[in-house]
Image: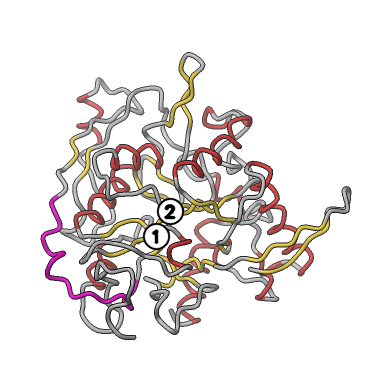
Amino acid sequence: MPSFVRFCFALSLLTACAPTDREGSALANAATPESSTGGSVIETVRMDTADSDTVGANRSQMLAANGDQPGIVSMSVAPVAADSAAAQRVPNEYGRIPVVEYHLVDSTDGTYKVSRERFRAELDTLYARGYRPISLAEMLDKKIDLPRGMSPVLFIFDDASPSQFRYVERDGQLTVDPTSALGLWMDFAKDKPDWRNRGLFCLLSGAEAGRSFFGNKGIEGQKSEWRFPKLQQLDSMGFELCNHTLWHARLDKYDNAFVQEQIARGELAIDSAIPGYKVRGFALPLGMWPKTRELAWKGSWTDPKSKRELRYNYDAVFEVAGGPTRSPYDPNFNPRSISRIPLGKGMPLFPTLRQLEKEGPGGRYVSDGDASKVAGSP
């Protein structure tokens, strides 16, 4: 993405979010998810028939079908068609990879939001079109191993809101809320062994209004003591954790010392939940680089109380936008400037997938099914 276009995109996000000195609070004040007190199911269709970024049945009809109970919607999941085109795709492991970027998963689309119906539909669409989740480690280490004809997709969830991962407590037992993004993912994957738990959660640990490791202080029913177990559960399931600063500070506004503190304290919080965890990725808040660019991936901070020095050194840095990213086999791949596809109102997924189907430069990454060699040419 040209620098001017990237600037305009970032400016539009800043205007929409109206950030204060605590940008995390501006993001957090977006509409919160509905109550999860009832069993929740979703009406969904595949999103490969139009450029629309909304999907689902008429909401009043869904509520009427359930006695107008808020927070409960009916599910009629559209069947996912087999990817019959896989055998015909020409392998090209130098092709582009979609890195899809989610924030809130809520009742409706909006700035930094997609509806639950839309999220589920985008999972359906990606699966039906031959995309399968990979991890950041597989990308960075050049160990993408998929069946012939299949393509990788990297999922990233920014800001650690309860809408992404919420617990429901019943009779002293904690379960993943089926209306949260993780709950929807688990339901989608339960009968698809080739849809692995792979993806990245880029975390805030000290933002306001519940953006602290997926909810705290009773916000949206989430208890503070559940924060560390949530990170541990994600790790045990196969997902990866990523740093997104302490409270979503706009790094271009601050001096080098403050930038390093924001990043280092974010990593320290992750280490507190999972001692020794290796964080490999960092997502730039609002896509804004610090004045000293290198500090986005490498720096240090000394705790003034304990005098302990914490150093960080990331293999990957994520932009806020830019479209599908280059293959790690592409000689021009820059892991410290990985472009992403932000999704929300006015930002649909399908046009990008359709663009990737075009042959030539910019086409999709297609596996040859043989991890011992790289198919295609730069």
Would you call the spot at circle 2 few (<14 residues within 10 Å), some (14-19), or many (20 or more)? many
Mark sitting earlier along the chain (2/1): 1
- Please determine whether, in this image, residue 147 is positioned above or below residue 218: below
Q: Residue at x 20, y 60 (%)?
A: 129
Task: Please state the extent of the stretch shown in magenta in the rendering.
Answer: 81-96
Verify whether residue 94 appears in magenta: yes
Q: Position of residue 374 (x, y in %)?
A: 32, 77
| Main SS category, magenta section | loop
- Please determine whether, in this image, residue 32 is positioned above or below residue 371: above
Which residue is more in the foreground, 259 or 378? 378
Q: Position of residue 260 (x, y in %)?
A: 73, 63
Which residue is more in the foreground, 265 or 196? 196
Q: Residue at x 28, y 38 (%)?
A: 190
User: Secondary structure beneath disc 1?
Assistant: strand
- How far apart in space, not on screen, are marks 2 and 1 (Cα)? 6 Å
The residue to which callout 1 is attached is 154
Q: Are marks 2 and 1 in contact (CB under 8 Å)?
A: yes
Q: Quadrant of residue 105?
A: top left
Which residue is more in the foreground, 196 or 98? 196
Q: Position of residue 323 (x, y in %)?
A: 38, 71
Verify whether residue 245 appears in magenta: no
The residue to which callout 2 is attached is 199
Relative horizontal placement of residue 358, taking residue 206 as reference (left or right): left
Would you call the spot at circle 1 few (<14 residues within 10 Å), some (14-19), or many (20 or more)? many
Q: Residue at x 24, y 58 (%)?
A: 52
Relative horizontal placement of residue 81, taking residue 340 as reference (left or right): left
Residue farthest toward the top in the current orientation of the protein? 171
